């Protein structure tokens, strides 16, 4: 698709391109939607094979951020940015120039960290822009997003349990965790404290050993995690793991986890629904990090942010209830709710054609 077709197809407000040879910065900022608030989303630095690949990535991610902010009822819009190039080639000048670019947008886009960009890089950008969130170690910083993301997933999982079993309690339930890294480690802690039975897998033997030791977790082979007879399968490692190969293997009643882009295709979402497996849409259940960072805008308070994140219980509960009422797969319901909130705001602003 051409740039103009992309803008039209996905209703983008603006896509900004920068090619500053002086500092070697090739960047794209995608502002998908700002009716709910400033477009917010991290900056990714990646060696894209082509400009088209970079454009596809930034637009897909920016639109995803609009939906994530909307389903979470935040006064935030969706945006994202990419810097084209290997992360090892970044320089302070390049990052400062990117900061200038963000500043020129006057707050319509707020940047943050993503793959290839760390907190020190954000500090370089911050020398030129105020429109930046998630800078670690600063006074108003919301800190490491993994524990709070896990807290949101835990609450969303309870909403699923309530819908499937008539009780939000996870005591005695069997949870299969794919990946035992940053988020799933904290998630396992909550589940263990509540008395759930944990089974997990990780390609990293150290991460698996830590979970086995701390939580008495049963560790299974990475390919064996799909077959585990369990109440909840919780993806917390990779995307696209719900697909035509894995769906027939699943022996769970619920899929609820932190990983981004869990459904390989929309058909995978339909297949889960047809098999009667409840699915907590990924961008709704894993929004804890975004909600947390949102609180930096108002002066960060840990208690306020964490209590807000616990509201993922209601967000997921509402999606599941509407899915039953409308006899529609959860992923479609989540997109509809997100789009409806954006449409209502657009109508109020008189922006709807
Ligand atoms: P992480 O890198 O700390 O942990 C991922 C773990 O998965 C690692 O231990 C890795 O060894 C393991 N893994 C990789 N391939 C595997 C496989 N085939 N089978 C089993 N384990 C495998 O990442 P994280 O921060 O915990 O994030 C986990 C997922 O949640 C990612 O998809 C991420 O995009 C998503 N997510 C994270 C956050 C956050 O705040 N960190 C927020 C939203 C979404």
Image (spheres, rainbow, N blue to C red):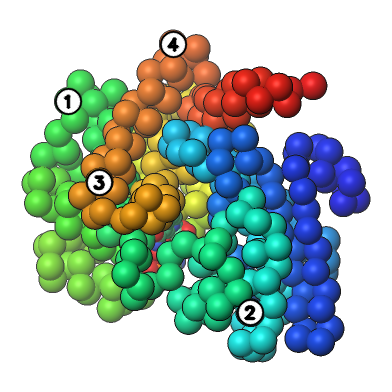
Residue at image location 26% in from the left, 63% down from the top = 185
Give the distance between the C-alpha atoms of the residues marked 4 and 2, in whole angstroms: 49 Å
User: Callout 3: 10 Å neighbours few (<14), some, many (20+)?
Assistant: few
In which image quadrant can residue 130 be found?
Answer: bottom right
Give the residue at mark 1: 167
Give the distance between the C-alpha atoms of the residues marked 1 and 2, in whole angstroms: 49 Å
Above or below — where is 254 with respect to 207?
above
Give the residue at mark 2: 95
Where is residue 165 drawn, in percent x and y? 22, 24
Instruction: Tell me the SS state at disc 2.
Output: helix
Mark 4 and mark 2 residues within 8 Å of each other at the beta carbon = no
Residue at image location 66% in from the left, 41% down from the top = 33
**Residue 289 in sight from this viewpoint:** no
Where is residue 312 drawn, in percent x and y? 33, 37
Query: Who comes first in sequence, dot 3 or dot 2?
Result: 2
**Which of the numbered marks, if any, corresponds to residue 325?**
4
Instruction: Tell me the SS state at disc 3.
Output: helix
User: Callout 4: 10 Å neighbours few (<14), some, many (20+)?
Assistant: few
**Which of the numbered marks, if any, corresponds to residue 159?**
none
Query: Who comes first in sequence, dot 4 or dot 3?
Result: 3
Give the residue at mark 3: 304
Frontmost residue, 195 versus 20: 20
């Amino acid at each position: 698709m051409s740039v103009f077709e992309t803008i039209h197809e996905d209703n983008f407000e603006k896509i900004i391109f920068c090619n500053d040879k002086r500092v070697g910065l090739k960047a794209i900022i995608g502002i998908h939607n700002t009716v709910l608030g400033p477009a917010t989303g991290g900056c990714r630095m990646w060696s894209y094979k082509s400009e088209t690949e970079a454009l596809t990535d930034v637009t897909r991610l920016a639109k995803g951020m609009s939906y994530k902010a909307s389903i979470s009822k935040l006064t935030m819009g969706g945006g994202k940015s990419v810097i084209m190039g290997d992360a090892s080639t970044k320089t302070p000048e390049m990052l400062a120039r990117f900061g200038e670019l963000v500043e020129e947008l006057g707050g319509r886009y707020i940047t943050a960290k993503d793959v290839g960009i760390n907190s020190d890089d954000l500090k370089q950008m911050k020398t030129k822009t105020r429109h930046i969130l998630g800078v670690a170690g600063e006074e108003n910083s919301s800190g490491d997003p993994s524990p709070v993301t896990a807290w949101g997933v835990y609450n969303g999982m309870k909403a699923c349990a309530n819908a499937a079993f008539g009780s939000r309690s996870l005591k005695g339930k069997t949870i299969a965790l794919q990946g035992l890294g940053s988020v799933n480690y904290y998630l396992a802690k909550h589940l263990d404290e509540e008395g759930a039975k944990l089974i997990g897998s990780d390609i990293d033997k150290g991460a698996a050993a830590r979970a086995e030791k701390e939580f008495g977790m049963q560790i299974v082979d990475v390919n064996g995690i799909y077959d585990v007879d369990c109440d909840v399968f919780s993806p917390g490692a990779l995307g696209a793991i719900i697909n035509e190969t894995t769906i027939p293997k699943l022996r769970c009643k619920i899929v609820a986890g932190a990983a981004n882009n869990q459904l390989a295709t929309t058909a995978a979402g339909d297949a889960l629904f047809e098999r009667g497996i409840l699915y907590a849409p990924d961008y709704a259940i894993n929004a804890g990090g975004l909600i947390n960072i949102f609180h930096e805008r108002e002066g960060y308070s840990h208690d306020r942010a964490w209590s807000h994140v616990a509201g993922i219980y209601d967000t997921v509960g509402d999606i599941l209830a509407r899915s039953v009422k409308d006899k529609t797969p959860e992923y479609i319901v989540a997109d509809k709710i997100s789009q409806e909130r954006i449409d209502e705001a657009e109508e109020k602003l008189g922006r709807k054609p």
